[in-house]
Amino acid sequence: MKDNNKQEHSGLSPSEIQVLEMVRSKRFLSIKVIIKNGEVDTIEGLERLDTGERIIDMLKQHDFQNLEIKQSNGKIVCVNRIFRKKIDPVAKTKSC
């Protein structure tokens, strides 16, 4: 109920609210919004992951993602992930 009030007062669509929530989370180094037919279709977020985490566990966290693993002297020094979130068509057309 509280979220619906935010939507009504802000004039934002559910997909626009998801984008703002990603920005405010401060987890992401960059956020890319893909728009089709004037509507938000997909959101991509680039985040740096903890290098101590197991790779298999990273792979299980999201259904759609790209992992970039950098290694130096046999040790993983950096892991970046771009994860994609497809916006639900029902959420795009749902009225407030």
Image: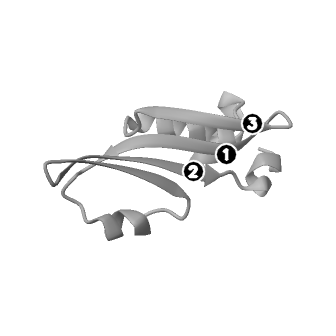
Going by the numbered disc 2, the residue's amino acid type is Arg
For the point 58% across and 34% down, which residue is it? 32
Side (left or right) of 76 relative to 57? left
Q: Quadrant of residue 20?
A: top right
Sequence-wise first label, 3 or 1: 3
Above or below for 76 versus 60: above
Disc 2 marks which residue? 84
Q: Give the residue furthest to the right.
A: 37
- Residue 33 lies, in percent from the top left, at 64, 35
Above or below for 32 versus 60: above
For the point 45% across and 40% down, which residue is it? 46
**Dot label at residue 28:** none
Number of numbered discs overlaid on the protein picture: 3
Say what secondary structure mark 1 lies in.
Answer: strand
Mark 1: give few (<14), some (14-19) or many (20+) Cα within 10 Å.
some
Sequence-wise first label, 2 or 1: 1
